[in-house]
Image (spheres, rainbow, N blue to C red):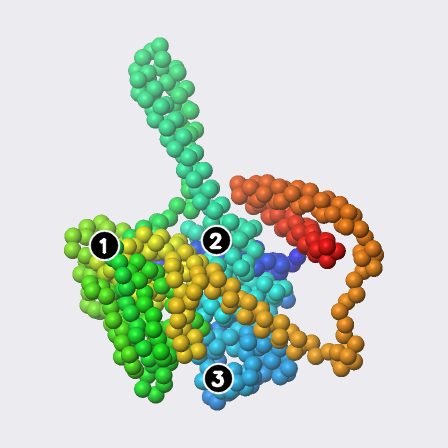
Amino acid sequence: MAVLLQIKNAHKRYGDQILLDGAEATLTDDVKVGFVGRNGAGKSTLLKVLLGEEELDRGEISRHPKLQIGYLRQHDPFQPGETALEFLMRDSGQPDWKCGEVAGEFELKGAYLEGPLAKLSGGWQTRVKLAALLLHEPNLLLLDEPTNFLDLRTQILLEHFLRHYDQACLIVSHDRAFLGATCSATLDLSRGKLTMFPGKIDAFLEFQADRRLHEERANAGVLAKRRHLEEFIAKNKARASTATRARSKSKQLEKLEVIEIASEEPTANIQAPRVEPRKGAAVRCRDLAMGYEDRQIATDINLEIDHGSRAAIVGDNGQGKTTFLRTVVDSLEPLAGEVRWGHGCQVGIYAQHVYTSLPDKQTVLEYLEYNAATGTKTQHILDLAGALLFRGDAVKKKISVLSGGERARLCLAGLLLSQYNVLVLDEPGNHLDVDTVEALAEALLAYQGTVIFTSHDRHFMKRVATCIIEVRDGHVTNYRGDYESYLYSVNKEIEDGERELAKGMAKPPPSALKTSKPAKPDHRAARRSEREIRKEMTNLERTIARLDGEKKQTSSQLMTATDPAEAMRLHDEVTALTKELTTAEERWCELQAEVMEKE
């Protein structure tokens, strides 16, 4: 295990905002790390420091002599008329077969690989950039919000690659599902400090919540004891007979200290509009065709969405999800057929084009007050503004000076303060951190109205969606299944494709193909009696039960560990137990198959 990067006593600030305050962390060559923290905490700034694009005010970054960083570029480094294969060969200096092999990891083949890059959608161009990044063979990948604007299929392809990638990664993301699938450790940036947790994002969030609860309970006990001592001192300090005891209690009081809860930060407090629940269909599409004058996207759309549903619109980038949403809300006129909303539907829209037309002269607070439902208290408006990162004097900012991300959050806040009983949301989780996305999901779960939405955040989709509408190959259909089953079908499709690709890459010689036969079973295993096999299975079951118990116990200790070295030791122990458990379970399955064959 080699240390690739070491951050020592790092300090960085912008004006009054402290981003790094004595931060320290170590990145080794054998760990994929999910980098989390609130929006504005300084994650992207730290990545720029690691890339050498910015400098620390004070502190040191130690780099391994053989460190090779790969960073996903946000700009398009393509030349006019260039194909994906030509770009990959030019950018990496690798031969065409190597470029084709890596491109195949992202399903870049045929016209996608050999056709002009300019004709590919943004999602497919991102796949090309990812392939180019990996062809440089870095030993540390830095990915800043890699899942933003990537469709589900591309996300899963990237996940599959990262799981088999044997080099280090540092991944900034608010997508819990993606971090959970790719990263074995979690780095948190909070109040200028870096904390490395030797476990996945869900375990980290649970550990963080448990630790905070423990600290709050400990503080409550200290405060109660303080009050008791203060009352005793006040009653007895003036009496000569008890003054000595009062002084003794005063010394005890001075020693009582509350624990400083470092993670205590403003928590997102989001409430959806309060509306009356309704029944029946909220919207019906009949013989609908959608698209543009020069290009038809989908036809024969016949579906309806019931009141109270939370309908997730899914499909690959470029298939027409946003076009469908625009057609449904009458932002784009249908080519044929009709969209009919139910009686009394009041539709609020959050889309990428909406926040570009906000009134520049209004302040944040003026805009929210104007959009809030009649009778909404100013404090509730300020609470929601704070939850979406407009705190303190930020509510006095003019809209004209807000960034794109700030405008997006402001538009979302305005919708949540309204009385709309239908919310149409296009990627509402972009520009929000993990905690705020979770708070938004909770708010939508409590909402009595109808939600129609798109999102690239699988954790958010899984939490919120009650029905799935798929846009694919010129059709829009109600997918008969929940989001989990949809994920399974996409995963299976990708895995089948990877197996086909692997077969094609292997290219066995003709002689091998001719003599290829099923492997012969081990004769010694074949001669074993069923009784002997069942005896081994019984022993394995005892082993599995023991390992499972040890894993649960060690995991429980890991959750309460406060010392980083002890936490790392426990994490390694859990990893080893998991590996042993998997081996034992796989062997049991093999033996079970033997027994079934004998029967």
User: Going by the image, does 18 lie left or right of 550?
Assistant: left
Q: Nearer the viewer, mark 3 or mark 1?
A: 1
> Which quadrant holds residue 92?
bottom right
Identify the residue shown where x is 34% and y is 88%: 294
Q: Nearer the viewer, residue 487 or 248?
A: 487
Q: Distance between the Cα atoms at labels 3 and 1?
A: 49 Å
Work out whether mark 2 precedes mark 3 in sequence or the reverse, and give the earlier one: 3
What residue does disc 1 label?
A: 276
Report the front residue among 330 and 375. Answer: 330
Residue drawn 62% across the image and 59% down it: 30
> Which residue sits at x=20%, y=63%?
344
Using the image, tell me which numbered label, if any, was put on residue 117: 3
Disc 1 on helix, strand or loop? loop
**Sooner in the amino-acid sequence: mark 3 or mark 1:** 3
The residue to which callout 2 is attached is 188
Locate the C terminus and report the quarter of the image it occupies. Answer: bottom right
